[in-house]
Image (cartoon, rainbow, N blue to C red):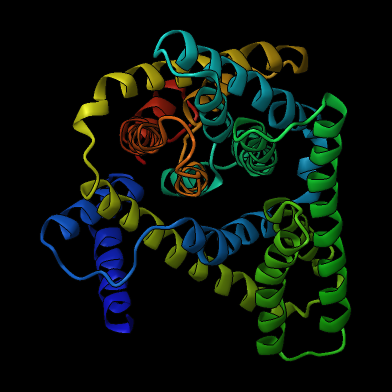
Amino acid sequence: MSGSLGILLLVAALVAMLARRLRLPYTVGLVIAGVALALSRAPLGLTLTRELIFNTLLPPLLFEAAFFIEWDALKRDWKPVLTLATLGVLVSGAVVAAGMHFLARWPLAPAVVFGALIAATDPVSVIATFKDAGVRGRVRLLVESESLLNDGVAAVVFGVALLCATGTSLSAGGAMLLLAREAGGGALVGGLVGAGVLFLAGKTDDHLVEITFTTIAAFGSFLLAQQLHCSGVLSTLVCGLILGNVGSLGSLTDRGRESVGSFWEWAAFVANSLVFLLIGARLASISLRPFLGVAAIAIVVTLISRAIAVYPLCAPFKIPLPERHVLFWGGLRGALGLALALGLPESLPRHTEVLAVTFLVVVFSIVIQGITFVPFLKKLGLLDANK
């Protein structure tokens, strides 16, 4: 496996260099490279699974993104961010479920489950695209913060939807209690882990020890919350926000904070690279042709659901129309949706179709929306034309 991992990282580095020269999104290049590797039958040593995404790749990506979000900036826009991440997810999921049920003729159970897993924009895809584009300022904060929060909310909603779809009887009160337990428990675990790491980090001035503590925090907060049947996504998000903001007040040394930041940028690059390379490799191994028609319906319905969630919900907060356009088109789908789809029980009606359609929606999002995102920003005047 170590040799295969070395090859994957070499490919990722070469793709990053080539994408920068060609001014193409790095994520798109990785997916294409992953398809090419799979078609060449090169031994990758890794397979994209729910366990790999959740236990290995997602925690560092979530932690790194949350670590660099400035709390003061987030407080200024917490109302639209929270609205989009909660009500927006529910609206989007309901629209997708209705569309797949009535237009694609899916039974209600798989339609609802698919709506829940595809409703949230994915921070892995969104943050990678924004970094490639060099976007800064309020619009980046809005999109990244929303993608992080709605990621956690969607994962919790998906868990409830899956229970109902697989025959577990839940009352409305029981469903709300389960949602509150997963979300509140995840946030509490993340807060406690973050506070504990800050306490320990304050006892040392060794930057290597501080990096080690943050690594334990990223993976520990996620895995501990999962073991307690809470949201690992929200746990790592809260932990990252605490260490990134409270840690800057003195718990982390100046050298330690700089080293921690550099380490997590590298860790996120590696995790990002593996996610998109393996998406491409898995894509090449799945027979997708029979599902192209229903996937086209799913793509259209997903885009419509995003528009319905973004434009009306942003109106009360007076978010300018160009920024709403970015929130709409920048609402990429990615690793989280795939992880949830890969973990679906085979007893779910249309299990294979749901998995294939999820892959096709994600690939459309990464490739088509990813390629057009920078030109779209330039047309809106939100990005330097020379970028």
Which residue sits at x=40%, y=16%? 300
Q: Quadrant of the C terminus?
A: top left
Whether residue 326 is situated above or below residue 68 in the rendered picture? above
Task: Determine if residue 233 is in view.
Answer: yes
Does residue 180 appear to the left or right of 55 in the view shown?
Answer: right
Task: Determine if residue 22 is in view.
Answer: no
Does residue 130 appear to the left or right of 201 in the view shown?
Answer: left
Q: Position of residue 215 (x, y in %)?
A: 65, 76
Q: Quadrant of the N terminus?
A: bottom left
Q: Looking at the rendering, which quadrant does residue 108 occupy?
A: top right
Does residue 373 appear to the left or right of 17 in the view shown?
Answer: right
Which residue sits at x=75%, y=61%? 225
Which residue sits at x=84%, y=46%? 181
Whether residue 238 is situated above or below residue 127 in the rendered picture? below
Q: How many marks?
A: 0
Q: Position of residue 154 (x, y in %)?
A: 64, 37
Q: Looking at the rendering, which quadrant does residue 2 occupy?
A: bottom left
Give the farthest residue toward the top: 102
| Front-lying residue, 258 or 237 | 237
Q: Position of residue 227 (x, y in %)?
A: 73, 64
Whether residue 143 is situated above or below residue 62 in the rendered picture? above
Q: Position of residue 271 (x, y in %)?
A: 46, 64
| Front-lying residue, 39 or 74 | 39
Give the farthest residue toward the left: 40
| Front-lying residue, 67 or 186 | 186
